């Protein structure tokens, strides 16, 4: 019985050894086949990535798309608005006829969305004197019409446009179009907190007008300024009011003595109430200037 167990044990060992040799040989055989296949069939390279097209935008094509009948007109205008921020693109848009067609579209369309986009483009190019005279000056009568009609959707944009025009070296050439700014300031003075953007813009235009020595109706401006000095708490608005009063004091033909006492009181309110250091410094300067005038 003992001899039988020993024979069985030797047989098991032999079988295991044979199996181990066989599977080891099969493994080596598969590895050789895989290595041979890798040599015969190299890995395929991925297809080359195409570079994005570098071709320039054809603004002539875009110019032809600037028409009211184009269902994608607002998309075209938004793209042109983005491009109009760059001087080189302004030149291309000028040569291609884009600006000419935008002005025609502006004149012909009453669509608010389209006119707002046109106004934004006008604001964008209003720092370029050549484009101002070529395209904006001929349409300013229509802009004035929107301004006098109280079109609230366009008012902030029109004021932004007039800020740039009143900052030009020859701002006097456009003085006729600024004549309604005192009335606009007066209209929104009692809503200065809610309509701060409009009030700040109107004050900025008036300040630019004093720098350019453009005369305007100071009565409305003084009354608005007195109200703002007494009631407004915005340092930004007060700073512009004080700047405007200082400039008017230095401009011949603009100062009106009849308002002087109330202005002195208003400046005094700012000196006692406003916490802004810059406002206080300017208010003190204006107060001293007014005191000299009284003496």
Image (cartoon, helix red, strand yellow):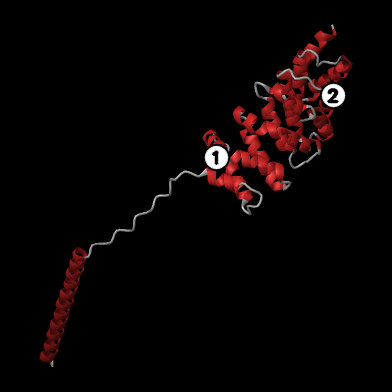
Tell me if residue 252 comes above or below residue 195 in the rendering.
above
- Residue lying at the far right in this picture: please name it: 258
x%, y% of residue 240? Answer: 74, 25
Question: Given this view, does label 2 or label 1 mark the residue nearer the observer?
Answer: 1
The answer to whether residue 126 is left or right of residue 192 is: left
Residue 87 to residue 109: above or below: above
**Residue appearing at x 14%, y 76% in the figure:** 21
Q: Eyeballing the image, is 156 above or below 29?
A: above
The residue sitting at 67% across, 24% down in the picture is 167
**Which quarter of the picture shows residue 139?**
top right
Residue 279 visible? The answer is no
- Residue 255: which quarter of the image? top right
The one nearer the camera, 289 or 165, is: 165
* Residue that numbered label 1 is attached to: 96
Residue 65 in the image: state x and y as whole percent.
59, 48
x 85%, y 9%: residue: 294
Please say whether residue 96 is visible from this viewpoint.
yes
The numbered dot on residue 226 is: 2
Label 1 neighbourhood size at 10 Å, few (<14), some (14-19), many (20+)? Answer: some
How far apart, in angstroms, are the residues tagged by discs 2 and 1? 50 Å
Q: Secondary structure at mark 1?
A: helix
Q: Position of residue 99 (x, y in %)?
A: 61, 38
Q: Position of residue 262 (x, y in %)?
A: 87, 19
Rendered position, 54 above or below 166 = below
233 vs 124, nearest the viewer: 124
Horizontal placement of 28 versus 164: left or right? left
For this orientation, the residue located farthest to the top is 295
Q: Nearer the viewer, residue 221 or 225?
A: 221
Which residue extends farthest bottom? Answer: 1
Mark earlier in primary sequence (2, 1)? 1
Tell me the tag on residue 224: none
What is the crowding at mark 2: few (fewer than 14 residues within 10 Å), some, or many (at least 20)? many
């Amino acid at each position: 019985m003992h001899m039988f167990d020993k024979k069985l044990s030797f047989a098991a060992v032999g079988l295991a050894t044979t199996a181990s040799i066989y599977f080891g040989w099969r493994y080596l055989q598969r590895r050789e086949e895989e290595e041979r296949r890798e040599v015969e069939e190299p890995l395929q390279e991925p297809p080359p990535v195409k570079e994005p097209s570098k071709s320039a935008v054809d603004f002539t094509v875009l110019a032809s798309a600037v028409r009211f009948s184009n269902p994608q007109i607002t998309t075209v205008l938004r793209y042109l608005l983005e491009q109009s921020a760059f001087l080189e693109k302004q030149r291309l848009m000028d040569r291609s006829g884009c600006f000419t067609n935008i002005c025609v579209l502006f004149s012909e369309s009453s669509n608010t969305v389209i006119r707002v986009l046109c106004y934004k483009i006008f604001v964008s190019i209003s720092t370029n004197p050549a484009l101002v005279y070529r395209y904006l000056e001929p349409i300013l009568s229509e802009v004035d019409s929107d301004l006098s009609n109280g079109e609230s959707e366009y008012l902030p944009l029109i004021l932004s446009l007039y800020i740039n025009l009143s900052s030009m070296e020859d701002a006097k050439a456009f003085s006729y179009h600024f004549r309604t700014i005192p009335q606009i300031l007066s209209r929104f003075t009692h809503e200065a907190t809610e309509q701060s953007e409009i009030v700040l813009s109107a004050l900025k235009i008036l300040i630019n007008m004093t720098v350019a020595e453009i005369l305007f109706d100071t009565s409305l401006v003084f009354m608005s300024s007195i109200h703002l000095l007494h009631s407004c708490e915005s340092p930004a608005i007060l700073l512009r009011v004080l700047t405007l009063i200082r400039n008017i004091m230095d401009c011949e033909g603009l100062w009106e003595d009849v308002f002087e006492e109330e202005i002195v009181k208003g400046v005094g309110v700012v000196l006692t109430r406003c916490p802004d250091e810059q406002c206080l410094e300017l208010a003190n300067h204006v107060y001293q200037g007014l005191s000299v005038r009284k003496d």
